[in-house]
């Protein structure tokens, strides 16, 4: 639309799970209450690993785990900052179901991270970060998961115009 502001996407390489976690932690320092993050990426891409980093960065209570069977989990802040609402939209038919959940807070009070939210969660906020994590083939002869992840962060809306993205690297 006319008022849509698009900031250039940020692209990073995440060679290890630790890098994915650190990326979440650094991004958390740039986030505030009301922010919405929509995560896309295949199973095992690292969406939850990255969200654990956000939880660590925000200093919230409770272990961040895959919310697959509970749709959404609220992690209150331990330090008076925004809570983390961690949702999994995989089995949701519509985003109204997230709005309908009794989270005992409004999304304006939390940083909301929605796994599998693409095509569903955009309606929750005009300003948002759309984050895609893509797995690219690592050492095929290794039994370990050596695949590198490429992450693309697409900031949408004027909320992100003055964000110091350089702190992510
Ligand atoms: P998702 O939530 O996208 O399904 P998870 O974060 O639950 O993914 O799982 C990712 C798995 O892949 C974890 O077991 C993690 O240790 C492993 N992994 C290996 N390399 C990476 C990497 N570069 N980035 C993130 N996770 C990685
Ligand atoms: Mg997950």
Image (cartoon, rainbow, N blue to C red):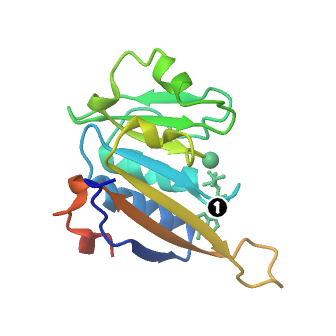
Above or below, comparing residue 81 to residue 4 in the picture: above
Q: Residue at x 43, y 76 (%)?
A: 11
In which quadrant will I find the C terminus?
bottom left
Above or below, comparing residue 115 to residue 96 in the picture: below
Write down the residue under mark 1. Answer: 45
**Residue toward you, 125 or 12:** 125
**Residue toward you, 169 or 133:** 133
Left or right: 111 with respect to 85? left
Residue 166 location, x and y as percent? 25, 75
Is label 1 within 8 A of ligand 1 (CB to nearest ligand atom)? Answer: yes
Mark 1 neighbour density, 10 Å: few (under 14) some (14–19) many (20 or more): many
Residue 49 location, x and y as percent? 54, 54
Q: Residue 120's quadrant in the figure? A: top right
Residue 85 location, x and y as percent? 43, 33
Identify the element where label 1 is drawn.
loop
Q: Residue at x 71, y 54 (%)?
A: 43
Above or below, comparing residue 114 to residue 109 in the picture: below
Q: Quadrant of ligand 1?
A: bottom right
User: Quick one: which residue is furthest to the left in this view?
Assistant: 162
Above or below, comparing residue 129 to residue 169 in the picture: above
Number of residue marks = 1
Residue 130 location, x and y as percent? 45, 56
Q: Residue 4's quadrant in the figure? A: bottom left
The answer, for residue 105, to whether it is visible in the render is yes
Left or right: 39 with respect to 41? left
Q: Residue at x 34, y 53 (%)?
A: 1
The answer, for residue 30, to whether it is visible in the render is no
Left or right: 114 with respect to 163? right
């Amino acid at each position: 639309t006319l008022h849509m502001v698009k900031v250039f996407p940020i692209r990073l390489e995440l060679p290890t799970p630790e890098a994915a976690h650190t990326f979440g932690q650094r991004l958390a320092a740039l986030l505030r209450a009301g922010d919405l993050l929509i995560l896309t990426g295949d199973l095992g891409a690292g969406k939850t690993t990255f969200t654990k980093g956000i939880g660590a960065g925000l200093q919230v209570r409770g272990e961040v785990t895959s919310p697959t069977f509970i749709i959404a989990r609220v992690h209150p802040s331990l330090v008076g900052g925004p809570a983390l609402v961690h949702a999994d939209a995989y089995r949701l038919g519509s985003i109204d179901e997230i709005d309908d959940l009794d989270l005992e807070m409004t999304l304006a009070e939390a940083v909301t991270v929605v796994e599998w939210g693409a095509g569903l969660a955009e309606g929750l906020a005009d300003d948002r970060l759309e984050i895609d994590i893509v797995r690219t083939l690592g050492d095929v002869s290794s039994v370990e998961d050596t695949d590198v992840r490429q992450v693309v962060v697409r900031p949408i809306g004027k909320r992100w115009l003055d964000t110091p993205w350089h702190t992510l690297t």
